[in-house]
Each structure stands twice: as structure tokens, then as C-alpha cells.
Image (tube, rainbow, N blue to C red):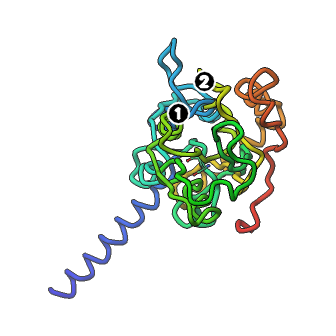
Amino acid sequence: MKRTAVWLMAVLFFVALCGAAAAADTLADAKKKGVFVCGVKDSTPGFGYIDEKSRDIVGYDVDFCRAIAKKMGVRLELKPVTSASRIPQLIAGNIDMIAATMTKTADRAKQIDFSYTYFFTGQKFITRKGEVKKLQDLAGKRIGTAKGSTSEQNAKKALPTATILSFDDYPQAFLALQQGKVAAVTTDESILANILDKAPDKTKYEIPDIQISDEPYGLGMRKGDKNLVDFVNKTIVEMEKKGEAKKIFDKWFGPKGMAFHMARTFKITTKKEPWEK
Ligand code: GLU
């Protein structure tokens, strides 16, 4: 009797495992439910922020989510995430994919899967004009950034004597700079350029030509969610071929926007990061 019970438990456990494995097909689930839930930033100008007129979340990342949901033939739902909350939200099943200025790193790839690189930038600083000429000018200073970002980690490594203050998002870090509480804000140039562009007192600040890292962005999906990863990769490569990806870039950062800071030097390709091979 006892043996039968143990067997029964083992069989039930196996069935449950199969169920869990089957549930990891987010593409099939989204098609069944008719909705794809994308985790995006809501306070990162250019990528995911609230449009003042429509009050909708808009931006480069949002347009990628929109194109992917459209290709699936389902409705898009947007859920705001922060740098720190995006991976936990994905793992908890609250969102289906992360499209939130997220850099692909070997460390993060232990927890989640990434698409091909769909945006490329590098980490820099916003400082008060004329104060910073070289990285060492920031040694021992207070520097603002966002919690849970690669910016936080890179800054600690590049400037071990600096005090890194981590905020929930980058506009808050910029506010600290405007209030004189930090000497610089650090993150991806793509984000800094957009924040500066929107600031009413932008002439007081600059982005010196000091880059401390490369930041290739990837769309984040649950580990082993292979059908979705393949679908997303196929879709974004197609978007590149059809010129749709460039159109989205031009819409948010194009000739009249941030091109001054960021030319579109990348292309969505099947090329992998060295650690992905
Ligand atoms: N791309 C960097 C990261 O993934 C900084 C931007 C962000 O915090 O989203 O951490």
C-alpha cells in the first residue's frame, strides 16, 4: 500500500512537471488568450514614457512590442517595470516579455533568455557644463543612477572611490543633479541624451565624451521559452529587412531627434555576443 502511494506521488509529480513545461510556451498562451503582455519603462524618454497629451506609454521599446503583438495577431497590453523589477516580474509570470532598455549580459542570461540585439549604445555621464573632462574628474564624487541596472555596476567598477546613489529611475537621478545633490548621472547615452533634450535647463549640462561600457539591448523572455524566442527573433530580423526597424529608430531618435548623439550604427542581425556562442 505504502509503495503504491509512493508510485502515485511520483506519477503525479511527473504529470505536474509536464504541465509546467507545457505552460512555458508563452507564444501559444498569448495566441490562446488573445493578448501579449509587455513589460516596458514608463519614465524613460525615447524608450518608454507617458505621452503628455494621450497619457499612453509610448517609445521605441513600445513600438517593438506593438510590432511583435501585431505579428502574433493579438492585442498588446503594457505593464510598467523598473530596472530592478523587470526580471522578477518576468519570472513571476506578470509579464510575457521585457522591452525595457535592458542590456544583454552573461549574468542576466543565467536567469532569462534574450533576443538578438535590437538596440546598441554605451554608458556615459551627464555633468554640469565644463566640470568634467576625463573619467578621473569624477573620482570620489556622488553619482546618480538607477537601481538594478548595469549602469550601477559599471560605475562602481569604473569609479571605485565614487559614491553611487541608486534611484528608482533616471529622471529621479537627474533631478538630484539639478538639485546639486550629485555631480553626475550615469547610464546609457541613449537615455541620457533624451533626458537632457527634455530638460528646460539643458544648456547648463553636457554629456562629456567619456564612455565606460558597451550596452547591447535585448528583449527578455523566460528561460527556455523557445517558441517565443524564435518567434521574436524571426520578427525583428524581418523588421530589419523590411526597413521597419530603421523607421522606428528614426521616429524616436532620427534626423530631428537624437541623431546628434546616436547615429544608427547597429543592425538587427543574428550576430551573437561573445558569451552567447
Ligand atoms: N541598459 C542598462 C541596463 O540594462 C541601463 C538602462 C536601464 O537601467 O534600463 O541595466
Assess mark 2: CB under 8 A from ligand 1?
Answer: no
Rendered residue at 45%/46% (across/down): 167
Q: In which quarter of the image is the N terminus?
A: bottom left
199 shown above or below 142: above
Which x, y percent locates residue 50? Answer: 50, 24
Residue 67, can we see it?
no
Q: In which quarter of the image is the C terminus?
A: bottom right
Indicate the secondary structure of the residue bearing disc 2.
loop
Question: How many residues crowd mark 2 within 10 Å: few (<14), some (14–19), many (20+)?
Answer: few
The span from disc 1 to disc 2 (Cα, nearest Å) is 9 Å
Rendered residue at 56%/65% (across/down): 161
Closer to the camera, 36 or 87? 87
Q: Earlier in the sequence, mark 1 or mark 2?
A: 1
Task: Kindly identify which residue carries mark 1.
Answer: 178
Apparent side of residue 119 relative to residue 175 in the rendered image (left or right): right
Task: Kindly identify which residue carries mark 2.
Answer: 201
Residue 46, can we see it?
yes
Closer to the camera, 216 or 21? 216
Which x, y percent locates residue 134? Answer: 74, 53
Assess mark 1: CB under 8 A from ligand 1?
Answer: no
Q: Disc 2 marks which amino acid?
A: Asp
Rendered residue at 72%/49% (across/down): 122
Q: Residue furthest top?
A: 53
Indicate the secondary structure of the residue bearing disc 1.
helix
Q: Are marks 1 and 2 in contact (CB under 8 Å)?
A: yes
Q: Disc 1 marks which amino acid?
A: Gln
Which x, y percent locates residue 36? Answer: 50, 36
Q: Which residue lies furthest to the left in this view?
A: 1
